[in-house]
Amino acid sequence: STAGSGSQGVSGGMQLSTGGSLAGSSGQVETSSGDAVGGAGGDISLVVGAGDSGDGGDTVMGAGHTSSGLGKGGDVVVSAGGSMNGTGGSVLVGSGAGAASHSGNVVVVTAHAGSSGVSGSLQGSTGASTAGASGVIELMTGNATQGSGGAVNAAAGTGDTGRGGS
C-alpha cells in the first residue's frame, strides 16, 4: 500500500509489472490465494476506491497484442470454480446502478474483421445435462413504471455476395 495523501493531494500509485524482454518471452505476474483444508478458499478482490467528484475509477483487464504474422492476440479468460459435490460457481457480469439517473450498460461485442477474414462469433449456450433438464437462455427487458417496456431485437446482417444472414 501507499501512504494516504494530505488534505490537498492525491494518494500514491502502485504498479506491479515484470521487465521487458528483447529476445524471448517477458515474465509472468501471478496473484493467487492459498488452498484450504477444512475451510473456504481465500478471495482475491480488485476494487477501485470511491470518489465524491467526477467519475468513478475504472477496472481494466486486457490481453496482450501481437505483431507476429502467425500468432494471435492473448485471451481474456474468466471462469468460475467447480464443485466436487455441490453447485459450481457462477460468472456474474452486471452494470452499476444509478441512484438518480440511468444504470450502466452491459456491452458484449466482437471486433471488426481486418481486410481479409471474418469477424468473430458471439455465442451463447447452456451446458448439456445427463440427469435432468439443461439450462435456460433468457433474454428479458425490465418492467417500466411511467414509460414503455424495453424491446428485445434480433437481426441478421446483410451481405454483398450470396444471401443475407438468417
Image (tube, rainbow, N blue to C red):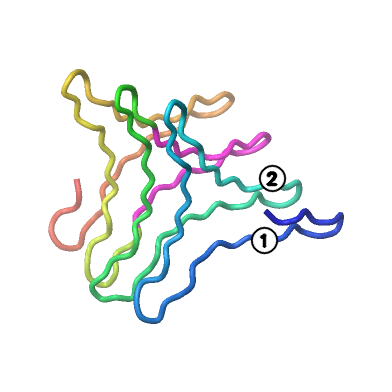
Q: Main secondary structure of the magenta part?
A: loop
Asked where in the image residue 13 lies, by quadrant, the reply is: bottom right
Which of the pair 126/38 is nearer the observer?
38
Query: Residue 7, image x and y in percent?
Result: 86, 54
Asked where in the image residue 116 lies, by quadrant, the reply is: bottom left
Query: Residue 53, image x and y in percent?
Result: 75, 50
Q: At numbered mark 1, what does the secondary structure look like: helix, strand or loop?
A: loop
User: Would you say residue 105 sits in the magenta stretch?
Assistant: yes
State which region is magenta.
90-110
Q: Name the mark on residue 41.
A: none
Q: Earlier in the sequence, mark 2 or mark 1?
A: 1
Tell me how many marks there are: 2
Q: Residues within 10 Å of mark 2 (few under 14, many from 20)?
A: few
In the picture as drawn, the residue positioned furthest to the right comes out as 7
Give the residue displayed 34% in from the left and 55% down from the top: 110
Residue behind mark 1: 13
Give the residue displayed 50% in from the left and 36% down from the top: 42
Which of the pair 47/92 is nearer the observer?
47
Q: Name the mark on residue 50.
A: 2
Query: Residue 120, image x and y in percent?
Result: 27, 56
Q: On the rendered image, what quadrant is the C terminus found in?
A: top left
Answer with left or right where residue 39 lies relative to residue 109.
Answer: right
Q: Residues within 10 Å of mark 1 (few under 14, many from 20)?
A: few
Answer with left or right where residue 84 lies relative to residue 132.
Answer: right
